[in-house]
Amino acid sequence: MKKFWQLCLTAILATFLLAACGTDDAKKDDNPTNGSQTEQAADATFPLKLTDSVGNEITLDKAPETIVSMMPSNTEILFALGLNEEIVGVSDYDDYPAEALEKEKIGGMEFNVEKIVALNPDIVFAHESGLGMGDEGLQQIRDAGINVFVVKNATNFDETYETIQTIGEATGKADEAEKIIENMKAKVAEVIAKTDKVKAKNMKRVFIETSDAPEIYAPGKNTFMQEILEMLSAENVITEEGWVMISPEEIVSQNPDVILVMYSYVPDIVESVKNRAGFASITAVKEDAVVQVDENKTSRTGPRLAEGLEEIAKAIYPELFGE
């Protein structure tokens, strides 16, 4: 089971690939003063036509009264929009907020079509990252006369904002979505304002691992985590493209200033990392800078992503946050 969760986490994280962008562009895009499509957001009027991430068009005659969510990030957005009563089903992986644990479970990557149809939702929010093995099941749900909206797999902060706005419009909660986005942008700007103080010569070198030995995976260039490190004026020790498997010996050779552990399926993982052969010589270990971060806050592209950014920033530069 632990191995299963490792593979699931790695698979979800590995979907966060994005086009390369410079640090300045990342910071500019996430500054709330720069404006975005959310500034023009207004209450959706029904009937409403929407086109999802795979080009399918749906028409909603009114705001949905019953909703099924098939992805934790979708679920967090829906709850943040105040749709607790409307949510009738969620995936097996949904654990936030606590109310999500009380909802009917519809399965995971292999979802239960019959249960979803029996719940008779006005709309099902699927997710682009779950396509492929789930295509046939989604079509069966459509054939049952149920609206299916495939949410785009957000690969950066801007796309996360767009996702929140879209789900807000689809549920008649555009104003609430705009407020969530504004709060997120304010938090991002606050965090970046602090890490902007870091000078190039003081920039910390960071290693992020998303699975334990013997198969240690880490994000490199053109990943969401690379964008986050650039936003925070930190350097990624991984210079290869995408997600790579790295040996403990190579981590020792890279000698990172900070090691971020982005998973929780291994008990006492921080101590385990520190005690790996040869790791005692790593700066991060010597300076007690091996830090476990919440993989949900830092990887789910929903309302808590800005909090995840702050958590990573504090782990890398605790002195900038009075910690």
Image (cartoon, rainbow, N blue to C red):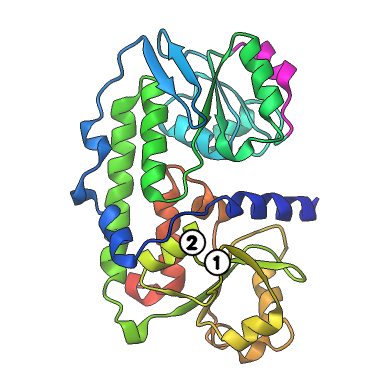
Residue occupied by mark 1: 241
Residue visible at 56% across and 36% down in the picture: 128
- Amino acid at dot 1: Glu
In the rendered image of this protein, does residue 164 appear above or below residue 21? above
Which type of secondary structure does the marked residue at label 2 adopt?
Answer: loop
Task: Tell me if label 2 and label 1 are in contact, CB under 8 Å.
Answer: yes
Left or right? Give the position of 225 relative to 164.
Answer: right
- Amino acid at dot 2: Asn
Residue visible at 38% across and 80% down in the picture: 203
Residue visible at 53% across and 52% down in the picture: 16
Task: Specify few, some or many for label 2: CA neighbours under 10 Å numbering under 14, 14-19, or 20 or more.
Answer: many
Name the image quarter holding the C terminus: bottom left
In the rendered image of this protein, does residue 187 appear above or below residue 113? below
Residue occupied by mark 2: 222
In x, y percent, where is residue 255?
56, 86
Which type of secondary structure does the marked residue at label 1 adopt?
Answer: loop
Say which label, 2 or 1, has the lower sequence index: 2
In x, y percent, where is residue 299?
53, 52
Q: CA distance from mark 2 to mark 1?
A: 6 Å
Instruction: Residue 166: give its label.
Output: none
Main secondary-structure element of the magenta-colored stretch: helix
Please count the marks in the image. Answer: 2
In x, y percent, where is residue 59?
44, 12
Residue visible at 45% across and 55% down in the picture: 308
